Amino acid sequence: MIHPILLCGGRGARLWPSSRDTFPKQFASIMSERSAFQQTLARLAGPGIAAAVVTTVEDYRFIAAGQAQEIGMIDLRLAIEPAGLGTAAAVLASALAIEDDADAMVLVLPVDYARDAGALFAEGLQAAAASLRPGTALLFTEEVVEEVAPRQMAVVGGKGGAAARLRSVPDPDDGALTGAALLRRDDLIALFKAAAPEMLEACRHAVADAPAEPGVMRLDATAFDGVAPCDFTEMVVSGPMPTQRAPMAAPCTALGTWSSVWDLLEKDGDGVAITGPAVGVRCRDSLLRSEDPAIQVVGLGLSNTVAVATRDAVLVADRDHLDALPEAISRLRRTEAPQATDHPRYHRPWGWYETLVLGHRFQVKRIMVKPGGVLSLQSHVHRSEHWVVVGGSAQVTVGEEVRLVPENGSVYIPVGTVHRMANPGKVPMYLIEVQTGEYLGEDDIERYEDIYNRC
């Protein structure tokens, strides 16, 4: 059985403003309506492949679980890793947690890649597993091989009904490494025992001491005191284990920068890629992208340019200078611009909210509560709230009263009154919230009960 371990903790600053600290690129809809995370999960559904373990940090726990639920992946398992440890510890801990499979193979897979959704991916993966030699690790590269000599082996889907096969790439520089790897669980543990015994010991303690929580393994940071951070791919490449390299069986390109996105998108005869409501006139070799239906991007006479508009930020850059994007974000941080880190839509375990209007002593929000979602029982010292349900039905608590509010129904919550909302229905509930008061900060909240343990 192949056990996928998905690496899902990166920040993705080079795809700002679509990717930000609070909602990074693996969860954003960059190439399609589904995120790269969702696309990766969908491709791993099939015989011989166990439910994926997703390694991520606490900040992204509920985003990952929510996006998996959206595509029907309800058996997802999460490994919550301490920040700053690198990928090696999360991979090892996830492998140690695999039970009841003596012949387990581990597939380590970053999720920030664009991959073809065809059967080639699963077919090539099964071919790789069948051909993997004990005591070796297979490292996947971005290169796609169409034809190979019989004496070679490659992860290539067979044509005309022929079986897929595995090619060992002799040149260590043949194709950029993707960070994806396939190896036996016992071999992975043996690698750490030889190359990083202190990390193996720390991971054993962290897994053994992880709190009992359904579908979640939370690794305690104190177990890793004194353990140096380490990247999993670097450990495999530099470690004592023999390695093979093979290209992915389907197109595989890192979503690292806007140039890589431009490379992947369909373009017109002048090399212009359009995403969303955008128009280009006399433009060449450019990307024009709008993520808001109310914002029309118009490019005139642009060349080698990236223009990306979101609801609260616009990026305009020469494609040859996209390497300066992290510096630009650092400058935004110094000015305390929220766009440097915060996505305009704030995701929570119960759903999300976004600010539509923020003025003097008032704020208007749009809130979505997913089916079964429940906000905390809370109160505010400085603001009152008006709620209008615009989709679905809300179960509302105001003081001692609990009632069901249908679409077009409204509720008033005075300052200091204990309240909460929940969605008891089977479809998302949408609500417009108008806040009024002298202080409207998110820290004006006292929680009394919370099913997500945030009190």
Image: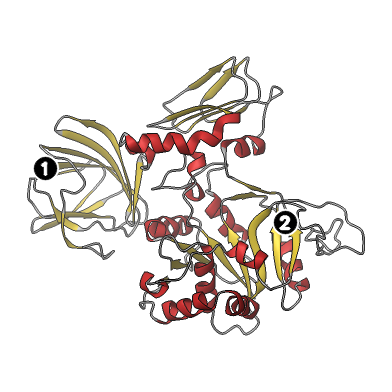
Q: CA distance from mark 1 to mark 2?
A: 55 Å
Question: Residue visible at 79% across and 58% down?
Answer: 157
Q: Secondary structure at mark 2?
A: loop
Which mark, by number, is residue 248? 2
Residue 76's place in the image compared with 393, above or below, is: below
Question: Residue visible at 27% across and 50% down?
Answer: 393
Residue 405 visible in the picture: yes
The quarter of the displayed image where residue 122 is located: bottom right
Mark 1 or 2: in front is 2
Residue 397 visible in the picture: no
Between residues 203 and 63, which one lies in front from this camera angle?
203
Residue 165: x percent and y percent?
82, 64
How many numbered marks appear?
A: 2
Position of residue 45 in the picture relative to residue 56 (left or right) = right
Q: Residues within 10 Å of mark 1 (few under 14, many from 20)?
A: many
Q: Secondary structure at mark 1?
A: strand
Q: Determine which residue is flagged by label 1.
A: 384
**Marked residue nearer the N-terminal end (1 or 2):** 2
The quarter of the displayed image where residue 104 is located: bottom right
Question: Residue visible at 53% across and 54% down?
Answer: 37
Residue 263: x percent and y percent?
66, 36
The quarter of the displayed image where residue 423 is located: bottom left
What is the three-letter code of the residue carrying label 1? Answer: Ser
Residue 202: x percent and y percent?
45, 77
Q: Residues within 10 Å of mark 2 (few under 14, many from 20)?
A: many
